[in-house]
């Protein structure tokens, strides 16, 4: 089923045992405690706090979880200092522009690159399961035309749980739901776009690649033949692969959190879509283009906006800059920046927003404010330029991010589901509210 996932309990226990390296000493109120130190395959180390409260009565405090490991994972490795991103050990540079998006998705979910036969069967299943339930098609008409496509996507993914059986113990059900989600996310995205323009929806067809099927559904007309431009198919393939996964980011952690309560996969993924929508996360790609357009409208004065970003009181941030993990370049931004040059050059597009982006990057990379804070362009900084070149409207950019990330969310959901260490996620808190008091003696006001 999932070759990489069919671990036995023995191997899991052995894996847990082998990763305990040494111990950390903690002295609290004069008493000494020893906590295990665990180490990953890339020599990352963590203090295992799973027994901290039981043994010391203390908890850790880490409001944005920046210093907290929530799980062990075999999916994606990021080295933020060296700008390294690997899916199941394969560097992103070995995959983007080199393999099909569906091949990279297979690798992430199954743990190994597919054989030719596995790849063909995987693609067949994804396309065969890419038609959405016919009863869901009229849902698009119930949204106001102003509805944001991320709202439509989150709603439609959640609604899928009403149309498809879900038995968590039935591996066949689980697998069918996996291929439905990956297959149908592109159909939902394309249908939302077509419906927003009052155009007839175009159904997916066998024999087209994942990106080509999406581009057909977006831009073909029932009135004439449509040939998918190869350069756009390739550009979209690169975009989908660089967005595939990114370890415990906000939306992926949300999918794991919701999944840990045993809510169904559609509920968990729909929650991930909503988390991705935020401007500080996947919504940044739309915010970047809106920022570049604002600078363009403002006479192209990018230096003014760099100055605003440095002024705490302005409330303005350079969207597409900075990252919680990458404290050097984001390898995905490097790949997308080159793709922008290649694709726009091939298409003969001279996008003034790309020039503004380049000026912003160059100015920021030589400005102490950004250098000291290690703020570099992230995946969202150049992706919008490419989406524009492909013809994707700005309000669809984050939907495109979700399309690429779908296999990543699913791979984490599957890994969490199969991990013996998984328990329902339930962080603690430090209470700072009123201490006990009584309402006795007060005149009843209810
Ligand atoms: C994604 O986690 C992932 O892996 C996410 C993602 C994925 O693939 O899933 O990579 C996708 O979400 C990429 C990030 C997209 N978001 C943006 O581009 C929005 C703009 N960036 C920031 O808001 C910010 O950099 C974050 C949200 C990305 C990271 O926030 P952090 O780690 O909490 O950093 P911070 O807010 O604590 O900032 C540290 C300092 C602060 O200044 P000081 O208080 O130290 O003086 O850097 C400043 C911030 O004010 N800062 C910025 C800035 N980002 C941080 N200043 C100006 N412009 C910015 N973009």
Image (tube, grey):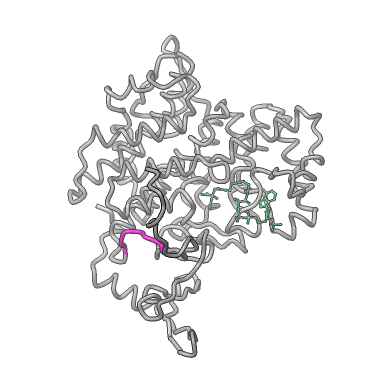
Examine the rendered structure and indicate whether residue 445 appears above or below residue 62. above
**Horizontal and vertical percent position of residue 46:** 47, 73
* Residue drawn where x is 30% and y is 45% of the image: 265
Residues 435 and 126: in front is 435
Q: Is residue 114 magenta?
A: no
Residues 275 and 40: in front is 275
Q: Is residue 425 magenta?
A: yes
| Range drawn in magenta | 422-428
Q: Main secondary structure of the magenta part?
A: loop
Residues 19 and 85: in front is 19
* Residue drawn where x is 41% and y is 23% of the image: 191
**Horizontal and vertical percent position of residue 219:** 49, 20
* Residue drawn where x is 21% and y is 42% of the image: 166
**Horizontal and vertical percent position of residue 195:** 43, 18
Examine the rendered structure and indicate whether residue 119 appears above or below residue 185. below
**Displayed quadrant of residue 213:** top left
Query: Looking at the rendering, in which quadrant would you find the C terminus?
Result: top left
**Displayed quadrant of residue 301:** top right
The image shows a total of numbered marks equal to 0
Examine the rendered structure and indicate whether residue 406 appears above or below residue 294. below
Question: In this rendering, would 27 be left or right of 381?
Answer: left
* Residue drawn where x is 44% and y is 79% of the image: 37
């Amino acid at each position: 089923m999932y070759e990489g996932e069919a671990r036995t309990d023995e191997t899991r226990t052995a894996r847990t045992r082998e990763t305990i390296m040494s111990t950390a000493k903690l002295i609290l109120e004069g008493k000494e405690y020893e906590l295990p130190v665990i180490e990953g395959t890339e020599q990352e180390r963590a203090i295992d706090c799973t027994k901290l409260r039981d043994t010391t009565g203390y908890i850790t405090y880490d409001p944005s979880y920046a210093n907290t490991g929530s799980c062990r994972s075999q999916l994606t490795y990021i080295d933020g200092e060296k700008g390294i991103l690997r899916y199941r050990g394969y560097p992103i540079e070995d995959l983007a522009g080199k393999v099909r998006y569906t091949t990279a998705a297979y690798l992430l979910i199954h743990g190994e690159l597919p054989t030719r036969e596995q790849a063909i069967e995987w693609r067949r299943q994804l396309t065969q399961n890419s038609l959405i339930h016919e009863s869901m098609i009229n849902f698009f008409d119930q949204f106001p035309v102003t509805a944001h496509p991320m709202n439509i996507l989150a709603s439609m993914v959640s609604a899928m749980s009403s149309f498809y059986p879900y038995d968590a113990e039935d591996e066949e059900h689980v697998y069918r739901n996996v291929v439905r989600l990956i297959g149908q996310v592109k159909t939902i995205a394309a249908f939302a776009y077509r419906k927003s323009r009052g155009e007839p929806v175009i159904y997916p067809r066998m024999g087209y690649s994942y990106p080509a099927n999406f581009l057909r559904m977006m831009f073909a007309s029932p009135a004439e033949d449509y040939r998918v431009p190869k350069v756009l198919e390739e550009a979209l393939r690169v975009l989908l692969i660089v967005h595939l996964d990114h370890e415990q980011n906000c939306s992926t952690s949300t999918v794991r959190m919701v999944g840990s309560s045993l809510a169904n996969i559609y509920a968990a993924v729909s929650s991930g879509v909503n988390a991705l929508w935020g401007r500080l996360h996947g919504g940044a790609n739309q915010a970047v283009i809106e920022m570049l357009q604002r600078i363009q409208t403002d006479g192209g004065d990018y230096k003014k906006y760099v100055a605003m970003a440095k002024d705490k009181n302005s409330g303005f941030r350079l969207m597409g800059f900075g990252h919680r993990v990458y404290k050097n370049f984001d390898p995905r931004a490097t790949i997308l920046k080159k793709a922008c040059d290649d694709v726009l050059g091939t298409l003969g597009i001279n996008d003034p927003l790309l020039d503004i982006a380049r000026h912003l990057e160059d100015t920021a990379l030589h400005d102490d404010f950004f250098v000291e804070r290690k703020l570099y362009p992230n995946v969202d900084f150049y992706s919008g330029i490419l989406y524009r070149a492909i013809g994707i409207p700005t309000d669809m950019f984050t939907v495109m991010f979700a399309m690429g990330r779908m296999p990543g969310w699913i791979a984490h959901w599957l890994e969490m589901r199969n991990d013996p260490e998984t328990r329902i996620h339930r962080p603690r808190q430090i209470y700072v509210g009123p201490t006990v008091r009584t309402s006795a003696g007060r005149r009843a006001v209810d």
